[in-house]
Image: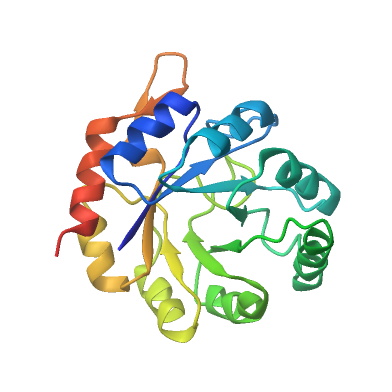
Amino acid sequence: MKVQIYTLQSVEEALEVVSVGVHNIGITPASIGLPGEISYEVARDICKKVDDATKVALSVSSNIDEIIEMVMFVNPDILHLCGEPGELNINGVQSLKERLEKLDKALPIMQAISVDDMSALDLAKEYEAISDYFILDTSTSAVQGVGASGNVHDWNVSKAIVDSVSIPVVLAGGLSPENVQEAISKVKPWGVDSLTHTNKFLKDGSFTKDIKKVREFYINATSK
């Protein structure tokens, strides 16, 4: 079981999380008020200096030029597209991939699917041919894009998607050390992702990663 942890905000924090055994680390290069967002410079530093994990950088943009600018500067291993559902359609994603290939920056696409109801299955089937991974997440009006809600969605829908597609699926949305084993048992994803429930929230509303919770999440996710 692959374990992905969002959102890392410094090289030091990323290295601490990776020392637990986490496979993928998520970063949020932005300046638009997203939870845990970091500058392109910090994001690039994390990608350059953290060797023992796959670096996943998200974008909520539907502007292909903006996404390419971020990828070229940050240089992640995987591009996580989690803009508002439908804003970047399959033709847009295909164009993005072709332009990155021409720039010698081809990289896997992790497409976010907002799991609201069974219509998410149709969306997954539509995007499957142009995606390398899916991340099944829960949307909230409080945060732009798909994810960062801290809420669990209907795992029956997620299970249907896992059973119906041939690419690796990461399950996200409200996963915690307490419920990750149940989620894995029900959905049987390729990987699991945690943001909100492995955070330590600070008085000013910001957060850091709670390394104890990260370790518990990792152990529970990877135990047989």
Query: Looking at the rendering, in which quadrant would you find the C terminus?
Result: bottom left
Whole-percent x and y of residue 37?
A: 59, 31
Q: Which residue is more in the foreground, 57 or 179? A: 57
Residue 113 appears at what percent x and percent y? 56, 64
Q: On the picture, is 163 further left or further right than 21? A: right
Q: Residue at x 25, y 37 (%)?
A: 213
User: Outermost residue, left direction?
Assistant: 224
| Nearer to me, 217 or 101 | 101
Q: What's the image's color scheme?
A: rainbow
158 lies left or right of 145 = left
**Residue 182: where, in percent of width, then height?**
21, 63
Picture layout, residue 149 above or below residue 131:
above
x, y percent for residue 200? 34, 26
x 24%, y 56%: residue: 221
Front residue of 198/218: it is 218
Q: In the figure, residue 195 lies in which quadrant?
A: top left
Q: Is residue 214 left or right of residue 144?
A: left
In terms of image quadrants, where is residue 104?
A: bottom right
Q: Residue at x 61, y 47 (%)?
A: 76
Q: Is residue 153 above or below residue 44?
A: below
Most distant residue in the top direction: 203
Q: Quadrant of the N terminus?
A: bottom left
Q: How many marks?
A: 0
Task: Determine whether, in the image, residue 92 is placed left or right of residue 85.
Answer: right
Q: Is residue 86 above or below residue 147?
A: below
Residue drawn at x 19%, y 53% is 220
Q: Residue furthest bottom?
A: 164
